[in-house]
Amino acid sequence: MPGREPTIRGVTRAVSAAGALALLGGCNMVVMNPTGDIALQQRNLILVAVGLMLIIIVPVMAMTVVFAWRYRRGNPNKIYDPDFDHSTTLELVIWSCPLLIIIALSAVTWTSTHLLDPFRPLERIGPGRPVPANAKPLKVQVVGLDWKWLFIYPELGIATVNELALPVDVPVHFSITSTSQFSTFYAPTMAGMIYAMPGMQSQLNAVLNKPGDSWGYSGNYTGRGHSDMRFQLHGMAPADFDRWVARVRKGGGALTAADYLRLEQPSEKVPVIRYAAVQPQLFDRVLNRCVEPGKPCMSDVMAHDRMRAAGGLHGLGNMPAGRDSAPLNGQKPTPALEKSPGEKGSGPNVTKPATSPPPGQKKPGDQRNRNLSSLVAPLAPGAARAEAA
């Protein structure tokens, strides 16, 4: 019935809104519900910045409604002053309030940028809880692959894929790199995003303060398998973490360079993999892009180039020169400018006309005179031009 249509539409909209609110009620705002001290300080920084900005936004929104109501057309008590042009009090409020807020935001941002520097060692493991003097950070090496995460615990001699377990209240030092693409290592409940870049090493110092499970992922789009490039983050009590390490050592294989090269191949939705042993210096070889047998490491090539530039190559063995080294497959190509004329070949734009004699000898203005071999040179001012042959 026509009369019932608006009512049905209203009920439908109310049910849809209630369903949307119910779905949102199940969301976990991990950024605003951190389990690590660094993420907690970053959350507080967000709240402080939003609060400072609301000092301006809320009064402006309120005054918009008040002014619209006070100066409405039907208000008989409104004041009309067409000659108003200046108010010192109003100017002070308009300029001083935003200026004070900008100064406050600048101070908070400057101090937080230094205090939350990811390269800076931790000074506390929680509010009012400084790092113990004898505390030793847990070292974790992170490699962003296509499309998975590799975690190496160098001091424990184990490694995992798409699983990161950490003891609570223990400082953790991450060394981060990637194989072929720019990724971002991001565990929202622990700390902010850190870039993982090929051939470069980023660092992150963080800590978890609560046991529990969450997720981490790459915040930078890296192609087809990006959506599934996630890892499980487990916060454990120290005793539980020790038991987890023991299980990994008993139930995993060994991660060698050959295994890594197979793991490096692009793959999607990779399940958790655990390795009970790791080849020594594997992360350094990944960082220097020399996991393949016979490939020189970037650090050695750069050291060789520095010695070569300084005029001495002693002490570096048979390391091939950086730009002068031959590729692993085939011979080093000859640069185009160093090739012989026979190798360069010729093309229609550089070939001399095949006609004999060339048209340019008799007709300097002929369009076929492509090699410009017999154009008449310009005359000096005042000189007479000779008759063409």
Image (cartoon, rainbow, N blue to C red):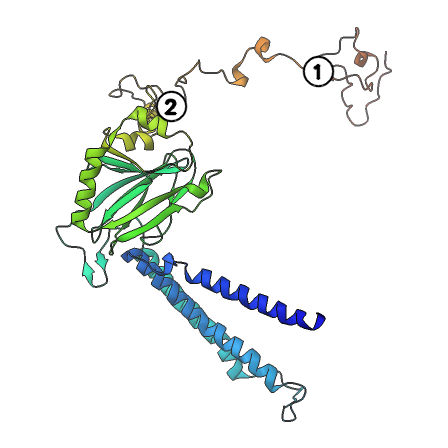
Judge from the rendering whether residue 194 lies leftward or rightward of residue 67; answer left or right.
left
Judge from the rendering whether residue 84 lies leftward or rightward of residue 376; answer left or right.
left
Residue under numbered circle 1 = 348
Judge from the rendering whether residue 196 lies leftward or rightward of residue 96; answer left or right.
left
Would you place residue 263 above or below residue 346 in this image?
A: below
Residue 156 picture quarter: top left
Residue under numbered circle 2 = 322
Residue ranking furthest to the left: 134
Q: Residue at x 48, y 75 (%)?
A: 58
Q: Secondary structure at mark 2?
A: loop
> Residue 278 at what x, y percent from top left?
24, 31
Q: Are marks 1 and 2 in contact (CB under 8 Å)?
A: no
- Amino acid type, label 2: Gly
Judge from the rendering whether residue 388 lies leftward or rightward of residue 47; answer left or right.
right
Mark 1 residue crowding within 10 angstroms, few (<14) / some (14–19) / many (20+): few
- Amino acid type, label 1: Pro
Cα–Cα span, label 1 and label 2: 38 Å
> Residue 316 at what x, y percent from top left?
27, 21
Q: Residue at x 42, y 39 (%)?
A: 182
Tally of marks: 2
Question: From this viewpoint, is residue 86 visible?
Answer: no
Rendered-image quadrant of the C terminus: top right
Rendered-image quadrant of the N terminus: bottom right
